Amino acid sequence: MGAMPTFPNVAIPNRILVPLIVACALFMENLDSTVLSTSLPAIATELGVQPIDLKLALTAYLLSLAVFIPVSGWMADRFGARVVFRAAIAVFALGSALAGFSSGMGEIIAARIVQGAGGAMMVPVGRLVILRTVPKSELVGSLAWLTVPALIGPVLGPPVGGFITTYFSWRWIFWINLPIAALGLVLATLFIPDIRGEERTPFDLPGFALSGFGLAALVSGFTALGLEALPLWAGFALLGAGAIACAAYLVHFRKVEHPILDLRLFAIPTFRTAILGGSLFRVGVGAAPFLLPLMLQVGFGLTAFQSGMTTFASALGALVMKLAAKPILQRFGFRTAMIVNALVAGAFITAPALFTAATPAAVVFAALLIGGFFRSLQFTSVNALSYADIDADRMSRATSIASVAQQLSLSVGVSFAALALETSMAARGADALAASDFPLAFLMVGLVSASSVLLFWRLSADAGDEISGHVLTKPDPLAEARERG
């Protein structure tokens, strides 16, 4: 793996340095998504579309991620993590530049797809490097080093995006990615180890086609429901075609030795629970960055900058939590922490349903801050538990499935929230959003997130103890004998 990198008389362990470099890519990706969410109303005005229609710019990116992520593990094993990681950063930067030059909704959606193709290989490959170079006993702490700098993106994103949109042009929210990408390329070239898979496996092209089309059609169909640009039957046709393709993949993957998405991993209880429960939880999390700026700007009349100076509280709370995640998991273990936290975080996802234009800004800020804290604890727990019982030779396949599930659930969250808004508008017989349309959407996505507790409840009491450091208190046989006597 090479000598430990050094800076002016200071040696930085790989378990810290590699996550920090990967965090540059994650910082850029998270900054981009949070900046865009804040700027949606202004972009919609300039492009002459309804703000709710720009859900396509969000879901197109997430969908592109979900489709191309399965290729990332195979490419890293085949061509080396460093080569793929650098290429991914370059493609993401190209998509960012194109998005900034867009003059219509079709162009911005196409540019976001290019960004997604880069992001699909950027963060998953970086995470794979961490998982293959860091001992399991240090995994939670190492993932925290990855996510702490990366969470600066969501903290800065809403205020920066709001400021740029209000006082300059929304196009600069994409162009600011370019210098960050340049820094990431330099650091990756210098310090990312060129890890390759020990075994060269053939690429599952039929599986990629079936899974990619199936997932794309399912999410696109769900997104199209309620979209005036497409008839209702088109949405249901996409859903049907996607379901058929996914069913065909279920038949296909059992017949090949190295499927693009190895669903056999779901036989591992910790992996299965973390992926399925985490996906339910992320539906609400994916919806919040879409709903909050729309409610504050379209519903309450705030500027993009005022909105951004409020919504960044969620990311600030998440940043603070990252310092507390390891001791919390060590004290309570994964099962207890995830059960309690799913309910608490779900309640805070629902909380904005109670906001009105008269709600004091300090109350809104505090609710988002605390909600971000608990939401981030669940993210850290799910991410770490996913790999608790995965051996090294299946790590890339596990990373692909986990990343696909994450992006799909976030995309479904945006589409689900938009559908709830459209339902409320239809019930009012209105063509434009109003503040009264948002409570239903927040309530629905919060309930979906909280329902993940049903899956976490099925975890064993000692699940993931090897990486959390949690030790169950064992009964004292002498004490039990004394009690019986």
Image (spheres, grey):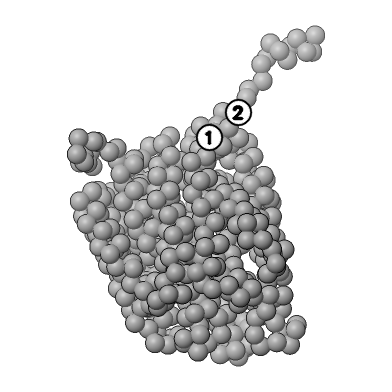
Q: Can see residue 462?
A: no
Residue visible at 61% across and 35% down in the picture: 332
Q: Nearer the viewer, mark 1 or mark 2?
A: 1
Q: Secondary structure at mark 2?
A: loop
Q: Amino acid at mark 1?
A: Pro
Which disc, if any, is residue 327? 1
SS at mark 1? helix
The image shows residue 274, relative to residue 419, as above or below, that is above
The location of residue 274, given as percent across then percent down, is 56, 50
Q: Is residue 166 left or right of residue 289?
A: left
Instruction: List the residue tagged with mark 2.
Output: 472
User: From the viewer's perspective, is residue 58 above or below residue 430?
Assistant: above
Q: Name the residue nearer the viewer: 356 or 47.
A: 356
Task: Name above or below for residue 448 compared with residue 304.
Answer: above
Q: Residue at x 43, y 39 (%)?
A: 141
How many neighbours does mark 1 have within 10 angstroms: few (below 14), some (14-19), or many (20 or more)? few
Residue drawn at x 70%, y 67% is 358
Is residue 439 visible to us here?
A: yes
Indicate left or right for 261 with 101 as reference.
Answer: right
Left or right: 125 in relation to 194: right
Q: Which mark is residue 299?
A: none
- Return the x and y of residue 475 as percentages of the image width and height: 66, 20
Q: Tell me which amino acid carries mark 2.
A: Leu
Pick whichever of labels 1 and 2 is earlier in the sequence.
Answer: 1
Residue at the extreme right: 485
Q: Measured from the top left, where is residue 297 in percent x and y? A: 58, 74
